[in-house]
């Protein structure tokens, strides 16, 4: 079973995305801050990470950069989910190594398709 680490500080968004992922047959681990995300990354070894951009502690962009520059986690696909939906944000995400960028509110079908594509490639 594919395990997804969802890093999101909004309880509502967490519930919506978690329900969507579980319906698609994925296991979900959640974190509400960058600090918690790093702990879960080490202990859970997820197959994919979904990051909100605006989080307590480090931003999703900073976490993405850390994941992609760490030898142990750099192969984990990262999807950034954010209300920040400008071309500059998307470019910045991709420069930091994000594998996909999905605007909020999340299109659940697009999210599942993206996860399937990224995890099939690994």
Image: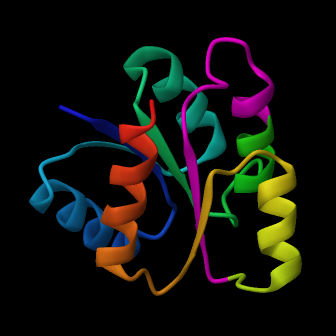
Instruction: Check the image and report above or below for 105 versus 46.
Output: below
Residue at figure coordinates x 74%, y 32% from the top left: 68
Instruction: Check the image and report above or below for 14 versus 108.
Output: above
Q: Quadrant of residue 88?
A: bottom right
Colouring rule applied to residues = rainbow
Residue at figure coordinates x 63%, y 35% from the top left: 35
Q: Quadrant of residue 5?
A: top left
Q: Position of residue 99 (x, y in %)?
A: 63, 51
Q: Position of residue 59 (x, y in %)?
A: 76, 55
Q: Quadrant of residue 17?
A: bottom left
Outermost residue, front side: 121
Describe residue 101's horizontal placement relative to residue 25 as left or right: right
Residue at figure coordinates x 82%, y 82% from the top left: 87
| Quarter in which the N terminus is drawn | top left
Q: Position of residue 13 (x, y in %)?
A: 39, 73
> For this rendering, which residue is in front, 67 or 121?
121
In the image, the segment drawn in magenta is 66-83
**Residue 14 visible here:** no
| Quarter in which the C terminus is drawn | top left
Residue at figure coordinates x 31%, y 63% from the top left: 112
Describe residue 7's horizontal placement relative to residue 99 as left or right: left
**Residue 47 visible here:** yes
Q: Position of residue 98 (x, y in %)?
A: 69, 51
Asked if the magenta segment contains residue 84, the reply would be: no
> For this rendering, which residue is in front, 15 or 109?
109
Describe residue 118's horizontal placement relative to residue 65 as left or right: left
Instruction: Check the image and report above or below for 106 versus 52.
Output: below
Q: How many marks?
A: 0
Asked if the magenta segment contains residue 77, the reply would be: yes
């Amino acid at each position: 079973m594919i395990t997804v680490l969802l890093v999101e500080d909004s309880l509502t968004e967490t519930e919506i995305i978690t329900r969507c992922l579980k319906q698609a047959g994925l296991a979900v681990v959640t974190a509400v801050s960058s600090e918690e995300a790093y702990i879960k990354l080490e202990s859970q070894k997820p197959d994919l990470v979904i990051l909100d951009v605006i989080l307590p502690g480090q931003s999703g962009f900073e976490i993405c950069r850390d994941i992609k520059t760490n030898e142990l986690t750099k192969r984990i696909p990262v999807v950034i989910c954010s209300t920040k939906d400008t071309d500059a944000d998307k470019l910045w995400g991709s420069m930091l190594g994000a594998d996909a960028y999905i605007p909020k509110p999340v299109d659940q079908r697009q999210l599942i398709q993206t996860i399937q594509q990224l995890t099939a490639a690994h």
